[in-house]
Amino acid sequence: MRAERFLTDSASRYPKKVALVASGRRVTFGELDAMSDRLATALTQRGLQRGERVIVFMDNCWEAVVGIFAVLKAGGVFSPINPSTKADKLAYVINNCRASAILAQERGLGILEHAQPHCPSLKFRMIAERDYAQVLEREGAPATMPGIDIDLCMLVYTSGSTGFPKGVMMTHQNVVAAATSITTYLENTADDVILNVLPISFDYGLYQVLMAVKVGATLILEKSFAFPQAIFNRMREERATGLPLVPTMAAMILGMKDLKVGEFPHLRYLTNTAAALPPAHILRLQELFPTSRIYSMYGLTECKRCTYLPPSELAKRPSSVGIAIPGTEAYVVDDNGARAKPGEVGELMIRGAHVMKGYWENREATDRALKPGPFPWEKVLHTGDLFRTDEDGFLYFVGRKDDIIKSRGEKVSPKEVENVLYALPGIREAAVVGTPDPILGMAIKAVVALESGSDLTEQNIIRHCAKHLEDFMVPKMIEFRDELPKTESGKISRRLVGALEAAE
C-alpha cells in the first residue's frame, strides 16, 4: 500500500466529512482528494517525473496538505521544510536531494529568491497564493498514482547534534507501517478530532496529517502554540479529542492559571514525544485532564516512533517511555552487543518495517545507524540513545550517548538531573550541561528559566537537588535565563545551551 491511499480510501468512505480545518477553511475528504488530483496533474504537466523530489516549503496550511498528497499521487517524493528556514540551508537541502520543484507560500518567496539561483536542479516552483487557484479550478481525472510501496515516499531532513542536515529516507512501506502502528495503540477512529499546532515540517506534526487522513479523522491545523488560551478556545469549539504535545507546550499549559480541572471532557488523549516529559509534569497533566489518557512516547525521525507507555502503566512507572510500538521490537544492548540485563544501561536498538532505508546519499552516516541485526536478512537501527529496562521490560530513557557528562569519574545523565529540577515548583524550563572544571573534569551546571512570579534562588535549587540526587550529580552552579534555546520542533536544545555556555 502507498501513502496516498490514505486519502483516496477515506475520500471514498467519507466524501462529505470534514478532513481539514486550516487557515479559516473547512475542507472535506472529497475536496481534498479532488484538489490533490488536480495539483498532481499540474505537477506532471510541468515535468515532474516518478521518484523526483519536491520541497514543500510551507507552514501549517491546507495548501501544504494538498501539496503533500499531490506529490505522492504524481509519483514524486516530498520533503517538508520549515518556512522559517534561511536561504543557505534551503539551498543546501534542495541541492542535496536535487529537488526538481518547490511548493511555497508568498511569505517564503524572499528566502526562495535568494536560494533558487544556486539550485540548478529546480525545474519549476509553485507559489500557493498565485498558482493553486488556477490549477484547482480545473476539472480533471483522478491522478494515476504511479509506483509501488517500496518507492521512496518522503525525505525528512534532520540536523542531529552536529554537521549538515541529513535526509532520512522513508518509503511508502515505512510510512504505512508507522502510521498503522501508532493509530492502533492510540485507538484512532473517524470520530477523532485532532488539534495540531506542531509544524508539519517536523515528523511529529507531519504524522498528525498522515494518521488523521488514514483513519478518516478531522484535523485542526493551527500554526503555533504562542497563544495557548486561543488554542484551548479552539479545542472547545471543535470538541477536540486528541492533542499532541512537546515538553515546552506542556510547561506552558501547566503555567496557565485559568485552566480548570476537567474542563475538557471530550479530550480523549494527549501525546508527548520529542523529549521525555518530566514525571512531575505528567502527574500535573493527569490532575488537569482527569478523563484524558496521557501517552508518553519516544521516537526519532529515523523510524518515526519507537515506544509508547500504555496509559494504564502511567501511575506505576511515570518516568518510563514504555514498550515497543505494535509490530516492532525495541531492546537494549551493552557495549559488546549483547542484550542488556534489567537496570543495565546500554544503547537502544529498533527493529521493524518502520525503520528508515538510510540517509540520502550519505553512506557513512547510514552505516553508523543501520548495522546487521540478530538475523542475517536484516539491519537494525542503532539509535545512539542510552536506555535501561526494568524487570518487566519497560524502557527508560537515560540520555544521548554524547550527552553524558563525566564528573569526578562518574557518569551523569542530564535527563535525570532535569527531572529533579522540574519537580521543583517555580521552574518552567531546565537544561543540564557540563562545564570544564580543573578538579572535577566537568562540573554540572543547570540552566533554568523560572515561572512568572517565582522567587527561587540558586541556593533553593541546589538544596532541592541535594535532597534527591547523589552528590556527584548535584549542580555546582545555576544560571538563570528568561528562556532556553530550542530546536525548530520546540525541544530545548542542550547543544545550543552548551554553545552559549562556551561562547561566554
Image (cartoon, grey):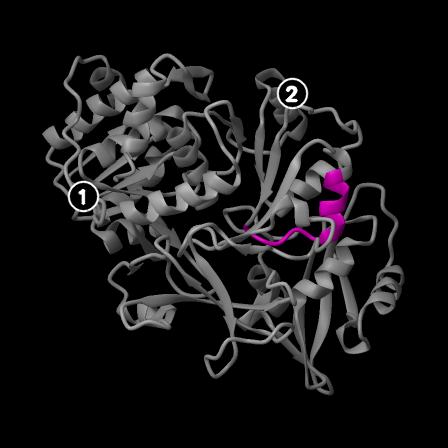
Indicate which disc residue 47 carries: none
The residue drawn where x is 78% and y is 64% is 478
Q: Is residue 459 left or right of residue 83?
A: right
The part of the image, by quadrant, that contains residue 112 is top left
Q: Secondary structure at mark 1?
A: loop
Above or below: residue 87 compared with residue 419: above
Residue kind at label 2, given as amino acid type = Asn
Residue kind at label 1, given as amino acid type = Ile
Q: Are marks 1 and 2 in contact (CB under 8 Å)?
A: no
Q: Is residue 114 left or right of residue 484?
A: left
* Secondary structure, magenta segment, majority class: helix
The residue drawn where x is 37% and y is 53% is 354
Q: Is residue 151 left or right of residue 421?
A: left
**x and y percent of residue 395 in the render?**
59, 62
In the image, 74 versus 162, the foreground residue is 74
Above or below: residue 306 compared with residue 372: above
In the image, 160 versus 181, the foreground residue is 181
Is label 1 or label 2 in front?
Answer: 1
Which portion, as a residue range, is magenta? 274-286
Indicate which disc residue 233 carries: 2
Q: Is the residue marked by circle 1 packed among few (<14), some (14-19), or many (20+) residues within 10 Å?
A: some
Magenta-span inclusion, residue 285: yes
Magenta-span inclusion, residue 484: no
Above or below: residue 465 compared with residue 129: below
Indicate which disc residue 148 carries: 1
**x and y percent of residue 93 in the render?**
30, 51
**x and y percent of residue 328 in the render?**
43, 56
